Image: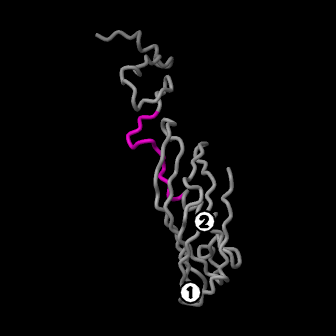
Amino acid sequence: MPSAPQTVVDLSGLNLHTGEGKRIELPIELAPFELGGQTYVADPAKPQARLEASRHSSGFAFKLTFPIHIEGPCMRCLEPAALDLDVEAREVDQISAEDSELRSPYVDEDELDIGRWAHDAVMLALPTQILCRPDCLGLCPDCGEPLNDADPTAHEHEKPIDPRWSALKDLKLE
């Protein structure tokens, strides 16, 4: 799986004092996403993102927002699928905190790795299944043909009898 491209923001270069904040617009590069062995790509690959950074007495608070369009195969029938998302993510980094929950994994010293954060934020914003349409019927389990636009009678395959139950056909019911 490709790693997320690195886009780093120098936090010391923001020159924020306690109680101050800054809003920055910047392009972020997103690598293709791999889910269930299938590859999904962002279009455009470098969406424009908004980073809001604010300084508080013990560290930083961040908010990242950007729209994204994702394309790839449907998870049920493998036909082309696409979806639009508005990604919103928040992070806190308290410099002196010993609790790991208060330290952002995207901040290293005075650098915020916004590329890796954006990649993870997209992964968390994705639905559990990416479908070509909400009522996708998937593939026929017998012949593998897509069922969405198929005639239902064309996929009434005769099922073989499970050998464990085959003795029941010899029973005579009165």
Magenta stretch, main secondary structure class: loop
Q: Quadrant of the C terminus?
A: top left
Q: Do the numbered discs 2 and 1 sit on residues whose CB atoms are within 8 Å? A: no
- Picture quadrant of residue 58: bottom right
Give amino acid for label 1. His
Q: Which mark is residue 27?
A: none
User: Residue lying furthest right in this view?
Assistant: 109
Up-down relation of residue 63 to residue 71 (above or below): below
Amino acid carrying label 2: it is: Trp
* For residue 32, side relative to residue 52 (left or right): right
Name the quadrant containing residue 120: bottom right
In percent of the image, x 40 and y 32: which residue is there?
A: 148
Residue 97 locus on image (x, y percent): 63, 81
In this rendered view, identify the residue nearer to me: 162 or 100.
Answer: 100
Residue picked out by circle 2: 117
Q: Is residue 133 highlighted in magenta?
A: yes
Q: Residue 164 in the image: state x and y as whole percent.
A: 50, 19
Residue at x 57% of width, y 48% of height = 40
Disc with the residue nearer the chain's start (2 vs 1): 1
Residue in the image at 49% along x and 23% along y: 142
Q: Please, what secondary structure does the residue beneath circle 2 have? A: helix
Q: Residue 56: which disc?
A: 1
Q: CA distance from mark 2 to mark 1?
A: 21 Å
In the image, the segment drawn in magenta is 124-138
